[in-house]
Image (cartoon, coloured by chain):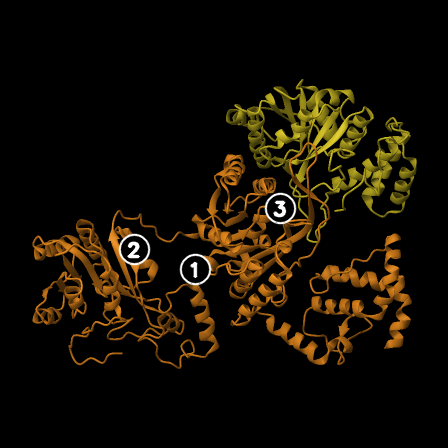
């Protein structure tokens, strides 16, 4: 922070290669600008770039500033400079043309000035007109109001003005990157180069004991990690951008939510499953809720396959055809089309529906219903898995045939802790809030070619949380032979990617939802006490521990424990040879995956086993062991 | 050879949601456009028979639909005035036309753009006597077995089928006196097979038939479905000369405390007493298939 005496001019800054002036100059250094032209430095201050402009670019430097002391300084150095306070565009232009007196402008700079001007839009209009008239590039620099230090202090209600710097007390305009670019585009100034000034810690890095600033506090690390992923601007001190004037871009204010479709559906295709793609679009035609758009992302499509995919899209009824866009992507891996598709998505939520998935008519509707109560969370409904073969009869095209019933492989609720171990949610059972991708800038990791969805879900789930509905809305098609991602990659690749994703998530601070403390408490409790061996059943069938106190975790975990005990017991082992026989007599007992099974499956399993003749017979063995 | 034929697409309505029917019409129009473009059919009529207590469409609404889609398909609507059931309803709709082919669909079914083309393929490619070609339903695929080389199957579900009129007339349509809502299609298929026709399942002809699963991933059925499928089970076993199966079902229903089983059995006994049971067929069991409580082999259970 600079300490100023009385009315001393505060902006006596020197040129340095690594400060804003050096960055400004580096942007025009390589340009072959018209000889004998003028470099117009609006808001020139102490004229830090005047020497390099004159000496290295051999342009004639003219500085303009509202401060007479700054102008006098430049005049004393033999530079051309004028005192002028920027006002309406016409007056600005008249003044500038008068001082130019017929000399052409080669380049314009307006360094750390826009944040001070009262007539911002008028000034933008002025520089745009000058740039257009003289075909002169404009270099603009403004302080970044979204620097980490400012943002992290605002979280603690701190807004400290200083004499100069990011929050200079004389600033009347503030800028983020988006605001600067949008403002320039509105006046036809299109960005062509950039060289921002970065400072990890700015003049706003105080007081250092603030927990959002204190270097090693978990809160700071969590927030910095989020912001690091969000964009590269957290450490940008000043945006330094070069623009050139052309036609203006129609100014759009951020779209209110109601103007967005509820759901963007991203459908990846490499064009080799035309029948299944047709079926996907047919399922979408049958949606009860039609508040969606579809982005078919054609990945590495040959011309023939592109024509085929376009044909499938174009053949759909008009009402749905108008909702579908084909976006082509070449190169990259499985993550690439997802990133491109998500980037193009306009929906409030975004989901993945691959070109061989099947959805019920309630798929979109259930997401939308869930969002009403849980807006901002990742939305999760339930997938069932069904096995398929590819067939071709003598009359049909090559197409699919279901060969199994519906397998309830995926639990009705999202479990954060299980999710840290393995993915229980196929992409099509989830809808992600658009902000996760568009604002927090989470991306599918293009360095891995498998489990890219697990990686994305993990990172997203601990930021947004997940709202679950037990309603079955879709079928995850599982090809018995051929092209599941599970079969296309080696076990080694899977394992390497698994460890990579795990390391990545393990290196972060995680936000856990309410209820997590009890779950962790129970898990640690069970681990410490080796609860497998100490639990027993009381007369009413409730599970109690040694002290007769019910464990603090929910009944689902209790039932998992009982099922685990059964499966780990000697009785279950002894019964194995009889199980085939039991099936013959229609007494089949479905053995659940204890880790994934839902409460009903566990109930069914426990009740069936305990009511079975075999279990009663082997009771003797259990009693002996006890 | 199927070329420039006439087609009637027909559906029986009962208290359906009008918007769903209109959405179905939109999909039909698209599929019709492709079928006409390929010159498989020249004249296509879409005919609805409404058994609802009050009409689902007014004359004006049908007129507007015809204005919108008349270029492709002529939409006709008949209010039956009473619930005839699907079998009698379809017989009536078929009788009132003379189209070369009849396509039967459920009212809310959605066709893929090429569904009609795909359904027509077996008639184009084969010289065999084909009585019915069935489309594949999504999202819940019917689990019945079919030959993955020939497409032949035991029977065709009439959620969406294409039938040549001569075949329909040869077996005098559906047995509406016996079946009200369920198994009319199984019975129809088996009678076609008795006459030497083949039943073809065409997996690349797909339709969306709006069905959802319960939260425990089970097939959801309505009370009416439960009752009429139980009643049809008894009648099928009787009609298709399987006294052994019939006895098993009767025993099971008698012991059951499920009300629709007992009601179905009462209705069967009433018909028996009144001499209203159908004529028995296929006494040497050449066609009928009763396997594990299903009408034919299943690929999997739902």
Image colour assigned to chain A: orange
Provide the letter of the chain coloured yellow: B
Quick one: SS at disc 2? Answer: strand
Q: Is residue A453 visible?
A: yes
Quick one: SS at disc 3? Answer: strand
- Residue A358's mark? 3
Q: Which mark's residue is nearer the viewer, 2 or 1?
A: 2
Q: Which mark's residue is nearer the viewer, 2 or 3?
A: 2
The residue that label 1 is drawn on is A439
Residue B188, image x, y percentages = 78, 28
Q: Are marks 2 and 1 in contact (CB under 8 Å)?
A: no
Which chain is indicated by disc 3?
Answer: A
Q: CA distance from mark 2 to mark 3?
A: 44 Å
Residue B11, image x, y percentages = 66, 29
Q: Are marks 2 and 3 in contact (CB under 8 Å)?
A: no
Horizontally, is A593 left or right of B67 in the view?
right
Residue drawn at (47%, 72%), measured in percent from left and top? Answer: A222
For the C terminus of chain A, which image quadrant?
Answer: bottom right
Which chain is indicated by disc 2?
Answer: A
The residue that label 2 is drawn on is A191
Which chain is indicated by disc 1?
Answer: A
For the N terminus of chain A, which image quadrant?
Answer: bottom left
Residue A455, image x, y percentages = 55, 62
């Amino acid at each position: 922070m600079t300490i100023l005496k009385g009315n001393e001019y505060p902006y006596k800054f020197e040129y340095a290669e690594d400060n804003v002036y050096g960055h400004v100059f580096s942007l025009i250094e390589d340009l072959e600008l018209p000889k004998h032209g003028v470099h117009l430095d609006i808001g020139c201050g102490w004229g830090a770039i005047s020497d390099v402009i004159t000496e290295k670019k051999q342009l004639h430097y003219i500085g303009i500033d509202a401060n007479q002391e700054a102008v006098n300084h430049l005049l004393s150095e033999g530079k051309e400079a004028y005192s002028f306070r920027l006002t309406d565009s016409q007056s600005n232009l008249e003044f500038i043309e008068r001082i130019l007196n017929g000399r052409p402008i080669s380049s314009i700079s307006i360094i750390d000035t826009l944040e001070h001007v009262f007539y911002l839009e008028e000034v933008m209009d002025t520089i745009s007109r000058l740039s257009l008239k003289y075909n002169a590039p404009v270099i603009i620099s403004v302080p970044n109001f979204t620097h980490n230090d400012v943002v992290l202090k605002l979280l603690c209600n701190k807004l400290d003005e200083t004499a100069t710097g990011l929050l200079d007390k004389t600033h009347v305009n503030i800028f983020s990157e988006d605001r600067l670019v949008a403002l320039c585009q509105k006046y036809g100034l299109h960005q062509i180069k950039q060289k921002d000034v970065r400072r990890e810690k700015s003049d706003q890095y105080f007081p250092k004991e603030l927990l959002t600033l204190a270097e090693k506090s978990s809160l700071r690390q969590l927030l910095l990690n989020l912001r690091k992923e969000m964009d590269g601007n957290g450490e940008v001190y000043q945006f330094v951008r070069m623009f050139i004037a052309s036609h203006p871009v129609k100014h759009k204010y951020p779209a209110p939510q109601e103007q967005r479709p509820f759901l963007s559906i991203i459908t990846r295709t490499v064009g080799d499953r035309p029948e299944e793609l047709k079926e996907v679009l047919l399922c979408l035609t049958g949606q009860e809720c039609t508040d969606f758009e579809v982005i078919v992302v054609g990945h590495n499509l040959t011309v023939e396959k592109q024509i085929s995919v376009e044909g499938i899209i174009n053949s759909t009824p008009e009402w749905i055809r108008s909702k579908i866009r084909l976006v082509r992507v070449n190169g990259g891996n499985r993550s690439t089309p997802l990133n491109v598709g998500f980037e193009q998505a306009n929906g409030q939520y975004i989901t993945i529906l691959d070109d061989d998935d099947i959805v019920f008519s309630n798929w979109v509707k259930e997401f939308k219903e869930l969002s009403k109560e849980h807006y901002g969370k990742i939305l999760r409904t339930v997938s069932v898995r069904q096995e398929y073969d590819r067939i071709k009869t003598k009359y049909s095209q090559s197409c699919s045939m279901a060969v199994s019933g519906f397998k309830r492989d995926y639990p009705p609720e999202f479990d954060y802790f299980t999710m840290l171990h393995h993915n229980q949610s196929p992409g099509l059972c989830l809808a992600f809030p658009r902000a996760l991708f568009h604002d927090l800038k989470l991306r599918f990791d293009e360095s891995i070619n498998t489990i890219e969805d697990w990686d994305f879900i993990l990172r997203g789930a601990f930021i947004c949380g997940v709202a679950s509905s037990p309603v079955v809305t879709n079928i995850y098609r599982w090809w018995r032979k051929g092209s599941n991602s599970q079969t296309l990659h080696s076990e080694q690749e899977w394992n390497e990617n698994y460890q990579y994703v795990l390391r990545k998530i393990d290196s972060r601070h995680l936000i856990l939802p309410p209820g997590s403390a009890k779950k962790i408490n129970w898990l640690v409790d069970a681990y410490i006490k080796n609860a497998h061996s100490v639990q027993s059943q009381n007369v009413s069938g409730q599970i109690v521990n040694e002290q007769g106190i019910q464990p603090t975790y929910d009944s689902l975990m209790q039932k998992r424990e009982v099922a685990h005990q059964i499966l780990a017991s000697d009785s279950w082992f002894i019964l194995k040879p009889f199980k085939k026989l039991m099936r013959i007599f229609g007494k089949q007992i479905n053995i659940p995956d204890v880790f994934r099974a839902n409460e009903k499956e566990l109930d069914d399993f426990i009740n069936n086993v305990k009511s079975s003749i075999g279990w009663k017979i082997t009771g003797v063995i259990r009693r002996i062991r006890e | 050879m199927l070329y420039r034929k006439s087609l009637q697409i027909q559906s029986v309505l009962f208290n359906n949601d009008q918007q769903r029917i209109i959405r179905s019409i939109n999909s039909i129009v698209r599929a019709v456009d492709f079928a006409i473009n390929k010159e498989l059919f020249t004249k296509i009529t879409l005919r609805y028979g409404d058994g609802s207590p009050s009409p689902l469409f007014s004359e004006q609404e049908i007129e507007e639909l015809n204005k919108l889609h008349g270029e492709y398909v002529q939409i006709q609507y008949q209010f039956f005035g009473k619930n005839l059931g699907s079998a009698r309803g379809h017989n009536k709709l078929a009788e009132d036309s003379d189209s070369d082919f009849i396509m039967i669909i459920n009212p809310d079914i959605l066709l893929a753009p090429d569904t009609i083309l795909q359904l027509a393929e077996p008639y184009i490619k084969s010289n065999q006597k084909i009585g019915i070609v069935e489309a594949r339903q999504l999202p819940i695929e019917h689990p019945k077995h079919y030959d993955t080389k020939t497409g032949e199957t035991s029977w065709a579900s009439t959620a969406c089928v294409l039938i040549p009129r001569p075949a329909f007339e040869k077996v005098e349509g559906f047995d509406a006196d016996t079946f009200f809502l369920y198994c009319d299609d199984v019975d129809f298929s088996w009678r076609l097979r008795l006459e030497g026709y083949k039943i073809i399942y065409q997996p690349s002809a797909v339709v969306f038939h709006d069905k959802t699963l319960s939260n425990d991933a089970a097939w959801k059925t309505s009370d009416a479905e439960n009752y009429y499928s139980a009643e049809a089970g008894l009648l099928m076993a009787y009609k298709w000369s399987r006294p052994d199966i019939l006895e098993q079902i009767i025993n099971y229903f008698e012991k059951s405390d499920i009300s629709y089983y007992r009601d179905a059995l009462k209705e069967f006994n009433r018909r028996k007493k009144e001499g209203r049971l159908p004529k028995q067929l296929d006494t040497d069991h050449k066609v009928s298939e009763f396997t594990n409580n299903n009408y034919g082999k299943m690929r999997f259970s739902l």
